[in-house]
Image (cartoon, rainbow, N blue to C red):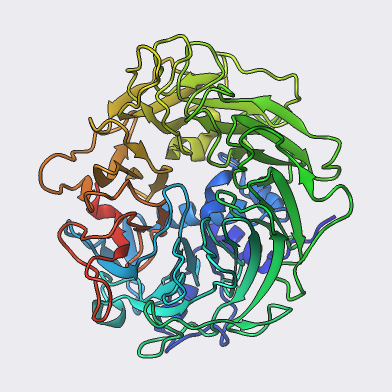
Amino acid sequence: MRVCAFRGFCVMAGLLLLGIPLWGQARMEWDAPGDAREEQTHLGYPQDWSSRHLLMPGARTEDVMAAAERDPRYIYNLVMRKVAMENGRTWPTARTGRPLPQPKHHIKIDWAVSLENGYVPQNQFPAKYQFGVSAENCNSDYALFGLTVTSGTQANLVGINNLYTTGTSPCNGGSPWVAFAYNTVTQTGGQIKTSPTLSADGTKVAFVESTSSGSYFHVLVLPNPIPAPPSQAGTVLGPQTPTTCTKPTTPGCMTTLTIQTSATDSNSSPWVDYAPDTAYVGADNGVLYKITPVFGGGAPALVSTGGWPVTVSTQTTKVLTAPVVDDTAGRIYVGDGYGYLYGVNLANPGTSMAQVTVGWVGNGAGTGVVDPPIAVTDSANPATDQVFVFTGCSIVQGIGGAVSQIPANFTSSTTLTTSNTVDLGSGSGNGDCTTGNVHSGTFDNAFWLHGSTSGHLISCGFVSGTVAKPLKPSNPKMYFFPFASNVITSTGSSTFVVNNTVGDECSPLTEFYDGTTDRMFFGAGSSKDGFLESSTITTSLATPNCTGTPTSTCVNAPSALGGTSGIVIDNQVSNGGTNVYFSTMAPGSVNSQKCNVSGGTANPYCAVRLTQAGLQ
């Protein structure tokens, strides 16, 4: 039986979930001079791309704590929401503990930091580490951006701290700080095309470097402590080069493990299974790899026994999504660009793999599975976990873009029907689709509280419009689906049209309940436009206003934005939290605010932070 590697966190988080506040810790962390990393045991947690793909809604505290022995993401997610609910109405000052009303935020860009010529792709995510469960820390909390950039003269891994510039006690006088910036390129043409994954204590990061023909797994040890102004471990224009190490133990050193020299990795972020200290990552040759150890201090190595690596996809388009490990189901879930979902057995990967047709395979653009599935342990449907998978063009007759709900124990004989697949914008009704991709959706707060008893799934698809071949792009449309007998249904669903620009796609959706308001955040755009939008969630969705000048639900970005990257969020805590973080996908200003710096390009890509309450 596995022992919880995060037992201290689990115990303290359990106290918080049971209603016992941790304000003593909150005050200690906020008041601590400089960085307190070596002076106390902190209860921090990461939020990265993987946080949204393994969920346990509606569960009892003791069940979540038990599940956290298999994967701490369960309790990270629940604690984050619990703290928000505790603090949503009032929050104590850092020094007195007396409640004060929440501060009101103006509609503006809180900050935008230059990323020069690099950006985070549309269906990939930055990462965020919070040093304490119930308080912000100016220096130890950071947002991390892995950038698609080939130039070796600028940083491609950038960490920004002093994030909370709108707090009652603003960090660094109200200015964010590039605390560390690295050029991690080890191969000619190497790029970070996928999302980084953080260690549980926030001291290390795992990511993949991809070239046109190869893929390389890195573990980088971040500075310890995280530099505080005026100190920096590199800048975006003047990055540090990590030292080479075999074992990731020394700050500033980076390990390099060759995954494959004949296949790039354009879409598969590494999933770290924290308890056994093991990573899984796919490559564009359809092969899934297992790597261990990762963050524990040993030298990362490919596993070549027990059926590993495993060939998952042999299709014409073999590009794999990021894998999602569900220890409860004993499987790894991964999709491919041809339109299939695979369930790989953790214990016996080579001979116990199931395959389900999700997309309209063999019929061109939009039919693939491009975002990782979402695995859900649903308290309202406890018999078996559920897997939600998204495609731009479904195999189900008469359905275009789609969300399908599939039991986690599916077999290769499982087929999708209109009973477990909902339409995200059909073409002509006979299988024609829009050619656009559908990225991962999200669930509302009612789902987090009660699971499929009363919750909803939200996804962005398309307006129906294709009437004949050749297939034609459409414009984006948002869909809000309830559940009936624990299965997703279009009966009683609601929608709104995102915009009227043909060819626009939505980024993956991000939802968060701050204790008073449930909100959804997403980017939308193409080569013609770009917006970040928010929608208030009640029993339906509020339609954002993205016409004319920026509004409380819409932020204008560069005209060639193409949407935004995936969006990561802050908790609602004590002083300056409740924010969203993303990168623009084209150079230029955001709401007329430029992020360029002296000596850099005049119109760089930007890392952006917005206050959630400013988009309401």
Q: Is residue 43 left or right of residue 312?
A: left
Residue extending furthest right? Answer: 306
Q: Is residue 547 left or right of residue 394?
A: left
Q: Please, is residue 420 above or below residue 366 in the view?
A: above
Tell me, yes or no, if residue 190 can be seen here.
yes
Q: Quadrant of residue 336?
A: top right
In this view, the residue in front, 616 or 372, is: 372
Tell me, yes or no, if residue 139 can be seen here.
no
Residue 128 location (% of width, % of height): 47, 64
**Number of marks present in the image shown:** 0
Residue 156 location (% of width, % of height): 46, 69
Q: Please, is residue 117 above or below residue 287 in the view?
A: below
Residue 54 location (% of width, % of height): 60, 45
> What residue lies at 64% left-to-right and 71% top-to-bottom?
219
In this view, the residue in front, 330 or 308, is: 308
Residue extending furthest left? Answer: 548
In this view, the residue in front, 434 or 129, is: 434
In this view, the residue in front, 357 or 448, is: 357
Q: Is residue 325 left or right of residue 362?
A: right
Q: Quadrant of residue 500?
A: top left
> What residue lies at 45% left-to-right and 77% top-to-bottom?
181
Residue 261 location (% of width, % of height): 69, 59
Q: Quadrant of residue 69?
A: bottom right
> What residue lies at 43% left-to-right and 14% top-to-bottom?
491
Q: Please, is residue 421 above or below residue 600 in the view?
A: above
Q: The N terminus appears in which quarter of the rendering?
A: bottom right
